[in-house]
Image (cartoon, coloured by chain):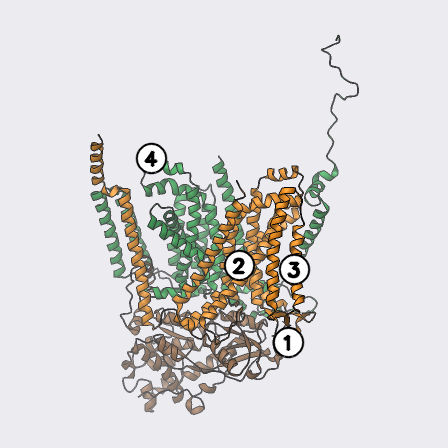
Chain colours: A brown, B orange, C green
Amino acid sequence: MKTKLLSLVLGATLGVAAATAASATTLEDVKAKGFIQCGVNPGLPGFGAPDDKGNWTGMDVDFCRAVASAVFGDATKVKFTPLSAKERFTALQSGEIDLLARNSTWTMQRDTGLGLTFTGVNYYDGQGFMVRKSLGVDSALKLNGASVCTQTGTTTELNLADYFRANNMTYQVVAFENNEEVNQAYDSGRCDVLTTDQSGLYSTRLKLANADDHIVLPEIISKEPLGPVVRQNDPQWFNIVKWVLFAQINAEELGVTAQNVMDMKNSTNPEIRRLLGLEGDFGTGIGLTNDWAVNLIKNVGNYAEVFNRNIGPDTPLGIARGLNALWNKGGIQYAPPVR
Amino acid sequence: MSAVTDEVRARDSRTSFWNDPKIRGILSQALLILVVGWFAWEIIDNTVTNLQERRIASGYRFLENTAGFGIVQTLIPYSEVSSYGRAFVVGLLNTLLVAGLSIVAATLLGFVIGIMRLSKNWLISKIAAAYVEVIRNVPLLLQLFVWYRAVLKSMPSPRESHSFADLFFVNNRGLYAPFPLFGSRMIWVLAALGLAVVLTAIFNIYAKRRQEQTGQRLPRLWVSVALILGLPALSLIINGVPVNFTYPELQGFNFVGGINMIPEFVALFLGLSIYTASFIAEVVRAGIQAVSKGQTEAGNALGLRGGSILRLIVVPQAMRVIVPPLANQYLNLTKNSSLAVAIGYPDVVATGGTVLNQTGQAVEVISLWMAVYLTLSLLTSGFMNWFNARIALVER
Amino acid sequence: MTGEPNAPRVPAFVRTESLPQRPAPVSERGVIGWMHAHLFSSWLNAALTVVGLYVIVSVAWSVIDWAILRGIWDGADREACLSTDRATPAGACWAFVRAKFPQWVYGLYPLDQRWRVNIVYIVGALALIPMMIPSAPYKRANALFLLIVYPILTLILLTGGHFAIEASDWLLLVILLAIALVLIVLLGRGAGMVDVPSALRLWVKVALGLVLLYALLGFDFGMVAVETSLWGGLLVTLVVAITGIVASLPIGIILALGRRSRLPVVRMLSIMFIELWRGVPLITVLFMASVVLPLFMPAGTSVDKLLRALIGVALFSAAYMAEVIRGGLQAIPKGQYEAAAAVGLPYWRMMQFIILPQALRIVIPGIVNSFIALFKDTTLVSIIGIFDLLGILHAGLADARWSTPQTAATGYFAVALIYWIFCFSMSRYSIFMEHRLGAGMRR
């Protein structure tokens, strides 16, 4: 490994501006160090979480692997930095990570005011509520007077206030620094309601002692388009990350999967041939090789495969595609064509 | 003669220009200022550049913007439409509340344990020793988590609350009690209380003087209590008891009305008091042991009883040893109250942290934190120094 | 007037020989006497004893009953710790502790690389034990090993080494060394401020050391790199606490000397630094380190998260260390300073040879106490998302496979016990050193 640690320590102690200024582009930088540093959630099963042995799994984690596959042809050339809600954008701004894939909501302020850019939406989400079945509540509109557990430093806290105010309801919010504390407090009965993005609720439900005692209410009180984020000053890297996601979605639409991607090379469908780099120079156009999409589909899979593997109906989370189905199957996942 | 030495001195200082301590001092200080200044400039320059690059506005204007988030415990009126600045003040008041109450409780508990530690009863002193050794060797944060979970776990849900006379309710949302709402005539009651305090002070001065002159002792304690309780009570009755109570009532999920002490507060209060008491106990023990045995024996020789010896002879002298480290413990407790952030009690660090998250104004928020804690430190140590000086006056 | 002046008149009713000694009354000797004096000297005391006894027995019994009698030691998941028997609910779920214990010790450190952590643990213990025994020889060499060699060894072993030492880093090193050399020659030859031969010897040592350090850090030992985000548990707790204390020693010494300096600027700056850090809670320092520190750095630089926390902790504990050392400096009699000055020692020599050795020896108990405080304070890093022992416990408690009513209680009990053992033994050691030093001082 090559770590800049030392020059940084020297730089910090001596006050010398350590000469690691980002003169190179992110792509050059990533290629030079040999891996992508990816910021992920420290523990949200289905999106980003390490298992007992430190292996990372989840949809966001797989997205990082897809980018690594596109850049290096190798899904293992990625390292994960677990980040709290508070630290995530700072870490990206300061260059500690190259890419942030940590179920972050795309908002105007974040997109325009932080020097960062959202590359797309890999999961359309919305804020929801979870309650105990025993409360007998079936709608969020019946939550007047409830106490609500939530995590501080998220859009959740603000949506919550807006929703209750708009519906003339009172509430009591108990906000914690760490997700773990939120879940524990809810589990021990401190709150009637737990609120976060709905995907997060499904994931949290699994962590509770008796998952079946809790239900997620049908209301979605906000739009939470979650997506990967990069720095704004590097259009090339922005394009790469953006098109990795589009390639996955296009692959699903065209029926290209991890299993059949090699056979698909014989396909005559021009759209597939362009996606797989058999026609045109789309890969080299964004600074990669022409088989970039082949690599990422082969190593990680198309959007549907990633979804089903991590959070789909057959996983413990059991989330239906819903909004995240393809545009021609009732959802709104839609990728521009490779052309 | 003197001309020669002057000349010699002049020549010496010329050859050993570097060795003149004064010049050396000035030079090294100038160098230090340069280095520190450059370091500071470097940091400020970096920060400004970074802030501009990340388009984060600087300055404290954001404090006027609408906060938009709720806070679970507010001592002053606050809602989601209040400003960030007000949210910060709410947090600050919460810090002061928990720190103030914990200081009182920790002091009481600490004195009890410290005196138990010195008890002639072997078992009691060992129990006190065990308390001190167990509590102070386990991290406070861990203890807070334990208390928080213990509080939550041992309490029932709101619908199954423990109730006392249908006025007080205890459940895992906290302790609910009736809360007085005062009418406008309450001002007269307050005035009566003020009058009672003044009268008590005058009476005490008179009683003290009389005791010094004649040796007669007046029942100071009883008269004081009667005055301070009696006058306001009388005024209360005359004014027709201008007080209404709001009573907690179960409505939907939770109790409404009355006053609520949330579990986060209880856990933090318990944790801080119990942890700090173990340190205060040691301070008290050292202080009492520092008073020489001869003092107690002299008191005995005068025919004073055990309690009087402790109250009149040992404690006043021990206080001189106790106060400085005690002040330190108060400061520690105040700073430790910032661990509230871990268990969701909205103190100044927790609400400030939320403001930081929502606005991204990291430098400003942290500067506010530092200002708050430095001010609290200065105030506490200032008060303690004054108190210390007062106690020290006893000595000739 | 006549009589026998020489013959003592012995009244017949006075004994001439003393009675044989009789044993003290039953109530004043042996176990009963001790109990009488210490437990039942008065009615109040007797009552207190009974109450105390009741408290002790009931606490001890409930702990033993919960932890041992009803404790569950084996099991693969939560099923083992869920009691089906309503009459005797399950006690402590030790199976959970056993399942998670490796994580508590190593965090998420890769399984096949844990030997590296083991080496760090073992070497550390082997070097520390003789350091703590006052009669063990080679203290100086041992201290140098612990303060210089061991940290480097630990750094390389834990991270995997092979740091990016680029040409620019070497250049910087050469330039700095060259500047130092020029300064020595200039100040020595030109102004006579330094003793050139000894300064040169020191320069050679430092230069060799730094070159060796650079070479070692840049060398590829062929170990797999392990990111700090995988470190956790006791490993992180110890890394944070030990780095904090080791780094705070030199900074603390300088600050303490600065605070007692005659130079107003030096004194002012030292006081400001010390009081600023001592006035604020550690958690705000950690938030600052994790959120604001990146802003202070030049654009494009990034510092590892753990390292940021370490910097915060080191600066924070340096302020406390400075006050501890200042206490030691103040305890040195003025005569020592005057004697040193009379011999003609310059300031730094005086500190190096006369004052600091004495002062540091006096403050050993104080340093150990600071270390205990710091060791407990390391738990705060879990708030900023670094998985120390407490943080990793919480991560484990969130594991649904182990969620039982007793998991949290058992986990907290076990982790509290670990912290307690560390802190209690250190505080005993501090008391032992205090007595020893006290004996030395009393002569």
Q: Which residue is mark 3?
A: B229
Inter-mark Cα distance, 1 to 4? 82 Å
Label disc, if present, on residue C342 of the rendered structure: 4
Q: Chain of mark 4?
A: C
Say whether mark 1 and mark 2 are on the same chain: yes
* Tag in front: 4 or 3: 3
Q: Earlier in the sequence, mark 3 or mark 1?
A: 3
Q: Residue A280, can we see it?
A: yes
**Position above or below: C73 against A129:** above
For label 4, the SS is helix
Q: Residue C243, can we see it?
A: no
Say whether mark 4 and mark 1 are on the same chain: no
Q: Give the amino acid at mark 2.
A: Leu
Q: Chain of mark 2?
A: B
* Tag in front: 3 or 1: 3
* Residue C194 spot, x, y in % from top left: 26, 43
Q: Chain of mark 1?
A: B
- Do the numbered discs 1 and 4 sit on residues whose CB atoms are within 8 Å? no
Q: Residue at x 33, y 47 (%)?
A: C263
Q: Categorize mark 1 by other alpha carbons within 10 Å: few (<14), some (14-19), many (20+).
A: some
Q: Categorize mark 2 by other alpha carbons within 10 Å: few (<14), some (14-19), many (20+).
A: many
Q: Residue at x 53, y 49 (%)?
A: B323
* Residue B79 spot, x, y in % from top left: 51, 75
Which of the 4 image quarters holds residue A37? Answer: bottom left
Q: Which residue is mark 2?
A: B140
- Position of B378 with respect to C410 (left or right) is left
Q: Residue at x 29, y 62 (%)?
A: A17
Q: Give the amino acid at mark 3.
A: Leu
- Position of C46 with respect to A108 (left or right) is right
